[in-house]
Amino acid sequence: MNVIVAFPKLENARSIKNILIRSGFPVDAAVTTGAQALQYANSLEGGILVCGPRFVDMMYTELHEYLPSTFQMLLMASPAICQEREIPDMMCLAMPLKVHELITTMETMSCTIARMQKKRKQKPAVRSPEEEKLLRDAKALLMARNNMTEEEAHRYIQKRSMDNGTGLVETAQMLLSLLHK
């Protein structure tokens, strides 16, 4: 999991970074502007942005708006800002900082991100019309040559795909090239 720490004062960013590293969280960057935070976030697959409410170039609301959807934001601000925040799905810790609250919140957010990443990976791949046609053609060939039902043909392609460590479409292409000879 990736962590970016962003505070307008570099010494604050470094302090939070050191606390997180000592607690076992790898920190990819400690930055002082919203633009720098976004630059790092866009180069990473996802994670947590720990930040303050104001930067020289933007407010936390703008930063949240431009943050990739694979990132969650943990805002560290005054109790007043935490209560008034406009973004409901964002975590907020009131200052002054309590280290155990920071660590517990980071652990909770890490678990949430891990679940989201797992769900994203489990979504079936969206296939192009050409890929769908390849699969249909391979199933049709198996059905005609081996007297299989469509379900049996599909399971056969799935099994070969898993056995060979290839995708369904790639397996369908191999079957078509082998059986068309």
Image (spheres, rainbow, N blue to C red):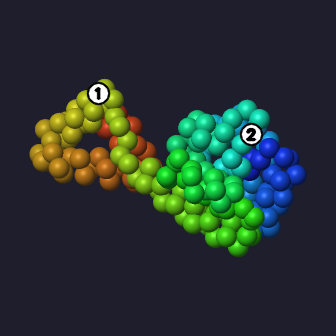
In this picture, residue 15 sits left or right of residue 144: right
* The one of 135 and 23 positioned closer to us in this rendering: 23
Quadrant occupied by the C terminus: top left
Quadrant occupied by the N terminus: bottom right
Residue 67 visible to the viewer: no
Give the residue at x 35% y 37%.
126
In this picture, residue 8 sits left or right of residue 162: right
* The one of 139 and 27 positioned closer to us in this rendering: 27
The residue identified by callout 1 is 129
Residue that extends furthest to the top in the rendered view of this protein: 130
Chain-order first, disc 1 or disc 2: 2
Describe the element under mark 2 as helix, strand or loop: loop
- Which mark, by number, is residue 29? none
In this picture, residue 147 sits left or right of residue 22: left
**Residue 132: quarter of image:** top left
Label 1 neighbour load within 10 Å: few <14, some 14-19, many 20+ = few
* The one of 160 and 35 positioned closer to us in this rendering: 35
Describe the element under mark 1 as helix, strand or loop: helix
Label 2 neighbour load within 10 Å: few <14, some 14-19, many 20+ = some
Give the residue at x 74% y 47%.
6
- Residue 139 in the image: x percent, y percent? 21, 39
- Residue type at mark 2? Phe
The residue identified by callout 2 is 55
Q: Are marks 1 and 2 in contact (CB under 8 Å)?
A: no
Give the residue at x 69% y 35%.
58
